[in-house]
Image (cartoon, grey):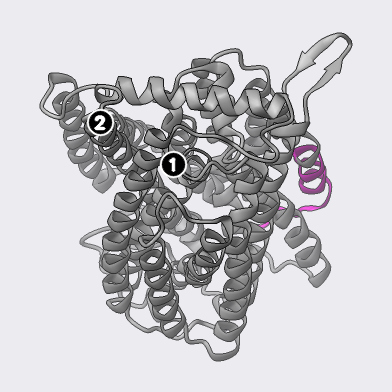
Amino acid sequence: MTDHASYTAPRVPTPQEQRVTLLAVMITLFLSALDQTITSTAMPRIVAELKGLELYPWVTTIYLLTSTVMVPIWGKLGDLYGRKSIMIAGIGLFVLGSWLCGLSQSMIELIGFRGVQGLGGGALFTGAFAVIGDLFPPRERGKYAGLIGAVFGLSSVIGPVVGGFFTEHGTVDIAGVHVAGWRWVFYLNLPLAILALFMIISKMPTLSARRRAKIDIAGSALIAISVASLMLALSWGGHVHPWASPTIVGLFAVFALGLVAFLWVERAAAEPVMPLGLFKIRAFWTTTIASFLIAMSFMGVVTFLPLYLQLGLGVPATQSGVAILPMMAGLILSSGLAGRMVSKTGHYKRYMIGGAVCLITGIVLMTLLGNSATVGQVAWRMFVFGLGLGPAQSLFSTVAQNSAPQGQLGVVTSASQFFRQIGSTVGTAIFGALLTTRLAGEMTARGEGAGPSGVAQAGLAQLQAIALNHETGVGAKAVVVDPVVRAAFAASMTTLFEAALVVVVLGLIAIISIPHVELRKHHVHAEPVAEPGEGTAGIVEA
């Protein structure tokens, strides 16, 4: 049972503190979002140098996995001990992971250090959204949620271009040591991280109330084990191991048993890492399902788009980054507009539905792309795709936070972010398995390769050829890709787009099911969300 008496409302920050803290949060969000995109255009070159195309999805998956596992833990710790200390710890881990990633000598090392980055990244996003919730009441959060979406979009615009530029042109010699250009996509995090750390330590006030409580160690461990088992099963199934193999079946069994044990532990925990009473609030669980599905489709498309552009269309790294820019422009535009309209009217559902319809339109248009598409044809479709993403990027957290009182802001925010990141991780894993399986079939049908290993060998050879072209100055003008590989990648990406379309349609259905609750104009400093059996009266509309 939660110790309700231990909660006291934090003091209201001054307008100056709000402005300074908001700036610090924006820098932190920029740092975290930049890292998610700056590596996308560099990944084919990284694989060419470090080898291991079969491990390509893991560089993204491991970051999402470790950050996802930590999200509910960081959120609860923020409620108990304050956001500031959690943000500082998260940035510290993120800096360490970035530095080590730049030093990686193999794909295994890079994957491991990306995991360290993810441990810190889980604190950055969760802490940032919770701080916005501490600073402003739900009605005002709409325009600031739009600002968050704009910052995310700006970092996403800069990331692919900067990543592509350093990958092609950033190789330098420092003190006689040859430093490959792709390593700078990780080293660039360091000055931004130091700036954000300075802002938070020196300027950010302690916003959330501190209270002594027992940490839910059992619940935290069980949720980490369950999620990790599920992600490994989805990533390895049908690729590293057959779906019916003892390894995959065992991982799914561990996930199921861990989930049951987690639910049992959370019902009795004094300070549950994820209060089960949240799932009795319709606005919370419908928003959670919708954000899960939208995130799943988004990552399923964006993670593999640079690979499609470079191997399916023969586009150099920098140009592949430029092709993604219109998506971020659309995201910034629609995110900012939707956020302002929500703050002005208090209504959000119409904008979420409109965004989902626009997202569906963008994906339908992308299914029409083949292996002869131009960068321009990809770019304007990505703009439509981005317009659809904007409202989802800025509003899901606001609606979830509006569904519960201030005393549980951290766990509500982290739970919402947790399931969104689960969706991203599941999307990357499932779509990666789908791409590999389809590629194997396409390559075999064309008499090239035999199964995933054949795909990996053929794809790696092409990436190495592209890298050689870059080093000799050829890659900046043209990239010659084997017609078989090119056709196989294009056909496989069409299948990926079609799968993403199905997922987004389900997301639209979930959005339609979200109840309309006008956003509150003031904070609600009430008791935390009730556990199952305690009732939830007065929580949603308080």
Q: Is residue 109 magenta?
A: no
Residue sitting at x 68%, y 29%: 470
Q: Which residues are magenta?
A: 193-207
Q: Is residue 39 above or below residue 244?
A: below
| Left or right, 8 with reference to 76 | right
Q: Residue at x 59, y 18 (%)?
A: 49
Q: CA distance from mark 2 to mark 1?
A: 16 Å
Q: Is residue 177 left or right of residue 415?
A: right
Residue under label 2: 233
User: Total label count?
Assistant: 2
For the question of whether residue 412 can be seen, the reply is: yes
Q: Tell me which amino acid carries mark 1.
A: Thr
Judged by its main secondary structure, the magenta piece is helix
Residue type indicated by callout 2: Ala
Please tell me in which quadrant of the rendered image residue 230 appears.
top left
The tag on residue 68 is 1
Task: Decide: few, some or many residues near mark 2? Use Cα within 10 Å; few <14, some 14-19, many ≥20.
Answer: many
